[in-house]
Image: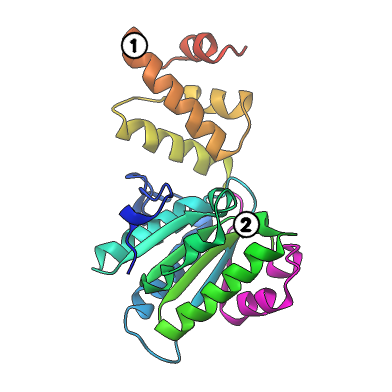
Amino acid sequence: MKNTSQLTLSVQLPDDEIFENYLSELNSSVVSQLILFVEATMLGQSNQARCLYLFGLTGVGKSHLLHASSAYASQLGKTSVCLSCAELLQLSVAVLEGLEQFDVICLDDIQLLGGNTLWQQAIFDLYNRVLEQNHCLIISGDQSVGQLGLTLPDLNSRLNWGLTEQLKPLSDAEKVTALQYRASKRGLVLSDDAANFLLNRLSRDMGNLIAALDILDKASIREQRRITIPFIKKILNIT
């Protein structure tokens, strides 16, 4: 069996992307479903769905929840791996060989495979091997299965076989809460005013907001400054 150290991929999970800190009341039922799905697949029941398709717009936290699912499987004592299709596309399809030996396999951003028949066939073959092993797949995309633009009918069919969950966009209040939580984990205090300033001056995409917070974190350590609105303006060069 291949393990994560043998894969030529970035498979290290972020420490701060777990179910407990996905802070969205609007999507609490999706989080509950993912937890139940991972737990149920651990039982090896033959009638249990083996694939869960998770979709939603950019910035709603799909990657976070795939990382969380993988981390939770590991917490339960099972093997898991979480891979990005963006990175897979830079490699040979041979990298998927043996992945079915993991209990839980998470694949992020499957919409990136649209038009790439070679990779779609490889994911379809992996799906079938996973079924044979009674293991499970969690796959994310930015659209419903029918809107993904996948050109391999068999893969579309497989994705429709399993469970499907849709993530709702985060509210501005949830984004502020998420930013403040991330800041607190870095030992920073991010006031409501500062968080809302970031939200109103930058892209509302959570990935961009967290990237900005990372820049501010490093700058605050370097300059020994609190994260205030003037400091944000200076470091991020915004008005």
Residue 67: give x, y in percent of width and height. Answer: 41, 54
Please identify the quadrant where the C terminus is shown: top right
- Which residue appears at 34% of the width and 55% of the height? 6
Q: Which residues are magenta?
A: 144-169
Say which label, 2 or 1, has the lower sequence index: 2
| Residue 192 visible in the picture | no
User: Quick one: 177 or 63, which is closer to the camera?
Assistant: 63
- Left/right of residue 137 with respect to residue 168 in the rendered view: left
Please identify the quadrant where the N terminus is shown: bottom left
Which quadrant would residue 153 be assigned to in this image? bottom right
- Which residue appears at 45% of the width and 22% of the height? 215
**Residue 162: in magenta span:** yes
Residue 25: give x, y in percent of width and height. Answer: 48, 55
Residue 110: give x, y in percent of width and height. Answer: 61, 59
In the picture of the structure, the residue carrying the numbered disc 2 is 56
Q: Secondary structure at mark 1?
A: helix
User: Quick one: 136 or 219, which is closer to the camera?
Assistant: 136
- Left/right of residue 163 with respect to residue 100 in the rendered view: right
Colouring scheme, one of rainbow, by chain, secondary structure, one colour: rainbow
User: Quick one: 112 or 199, which is closer to the camera?
Assistant: 112
**Residue 58: in magenta span:** no
In the picture of the structure, the residue carrying the numbered disc 1 is 222
